[in-house]
Image: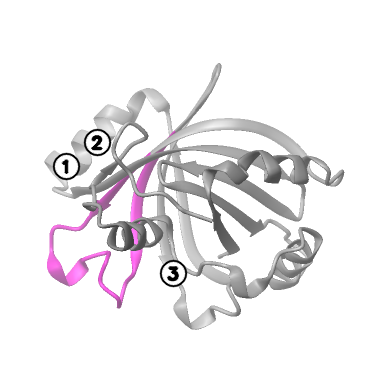
């Protein structure tokens, strides 16, 4: 189970939050990574991952940083009944594969299992962590997201989140309870932009405004 909270900001807040996180001596800075994530859906309507009764995301993610690369298959599902003041829990299952197997995996998913590639997005992720928490700054084509996720195996997950919300002078009520694609579609509606299936930095994207 994953317990986390998210906040969204204009992209020009990135330097501010990076400096604030580097001031936290308890946190280790792991660097900035490029990520590309593909999201697939089941071909049968009764197993549609996006329907409210399931509300899940099946993803394949490539992560790259200089001489480092990683590829992972993940299943993530929101547990709506456990949401509390912006903190939410999600079911998460992860499987790692070799990065050079990415193309073959895509072929298996689309040509053999007939999953549909429904969304794809890229972002840059800056990571800070210790044994209790992981805090990331995600640069999306439409804005910045700060995510605070519990990593402790011993402490109460919600108390860990609340502790770091307080340390960073944040407010629980300012958190955004949904995922990146919900935020993106919300911005598109407000700014009258078409909702793109493939979200990239070189496209005309909506922007989070202060």
Mark 1: secondary structure: helix
- Residue 161 occupies which quadrant of the picture? bottom right
Give the residue at x 21% y 67%: 47
Protein image colouring: one colour
Q: Is 61 left or right of 197, judged from the image as shown?
A: right
Kindly give the residue lying farthest to the right in the view shown: 25
Give the residue at x 41% y 65%: 77
Q: Dividing the image into 4 quarters, which one contains the C terminus? A: bottom right
The answer to which of 122 and 195 lies nearer the viewer is 195
Q: Dividing the image into 4 quarters, which one contains the N terminus? A: bottom right
Q: Are the residues tagged 2 and 1 within 8 Å (C-beta)?
A: yes
Residue wearing tag 3: 78
Around disc 1, counting alpha carbons within 10 Å, would you say few (fewer than 14), some (14 to 19), or many (20 or more)? Answer: some
Q: Position of residue 109 (x, y in %)?
A: 21, 43
The answer to which of 190 and 175 lies nearer the viewer is 190
Q: Is residue 66 magenta?
A: no
In the displayed structure, 143 sits above or below 3; it is: above
Q: Are the residues tagged 3 and 2 within 8 Å (C-beta)?
A: no
Query: What whole-number distance in Å separates the C-alpha atoms at marks 3 and 2?
Result: 24 Å
Around disc 2, counting alpha carbons within 10 Å, would you say few (fewer than 14), some (14 to 19), or many (20 or more)? Answer: some
Around disc 3, counting alpha carbons within 10 Å, would you say few (fewer than 14), some (14 to 19), or many (20 or more)? Answer: many
Highlighted magenta segment, given as a residue range: 37-62
Q: Position of residue 205 (x, y in %)?
A: 33, 44
Mark 3: secondary structure: strand
The answer to which of 96 and 126 lies nearer the viewer is 126
Residue wearing tag 2: 106
């Amino acid at each position: 189970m994953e317990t986390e909270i998210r906040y969204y900001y204009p992209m020009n807040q990135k330097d501010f939050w990076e400096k604030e996180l580097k001031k936290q001596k308890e946190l280790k800075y792991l660097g900035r990574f490029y990520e590309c994530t593909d999201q697939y859906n089941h071909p049968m309507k009764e197993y549609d991952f996006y329907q409210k009764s399931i509300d899940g995301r099946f993803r394949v993610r490539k992560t790259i940083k200089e001489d480092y690369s990683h590829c992972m298959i993940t299943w993530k599902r929101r547990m709506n009944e456990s949401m509390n003041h912006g903190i939410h829990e999600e079911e998460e299952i992860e499987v790692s594969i070799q990065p050079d197997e990415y193309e073959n995996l895509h072929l298996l998913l689309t040509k053999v299992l007939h999953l549909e590639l429904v969304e794809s997005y890229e972002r840059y992720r800056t990571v800070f962590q210790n044994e209790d928490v992981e805090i990331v700054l995600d640069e999306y084509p439409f804005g910045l997201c700060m995510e605070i996720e519990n990593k402790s195996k011993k402490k109460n997950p919600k108390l860990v989140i609340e502790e770091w919300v307080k340390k960073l002078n944040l407010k629980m009520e300012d958190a955004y309870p949904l995922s990146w694609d919900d935020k993106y579609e919300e911005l598109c509606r407000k700014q009258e932009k078409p909702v793109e299936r493939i979200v990239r930095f070189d496209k005309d994207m909506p922007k989070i405004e202060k």
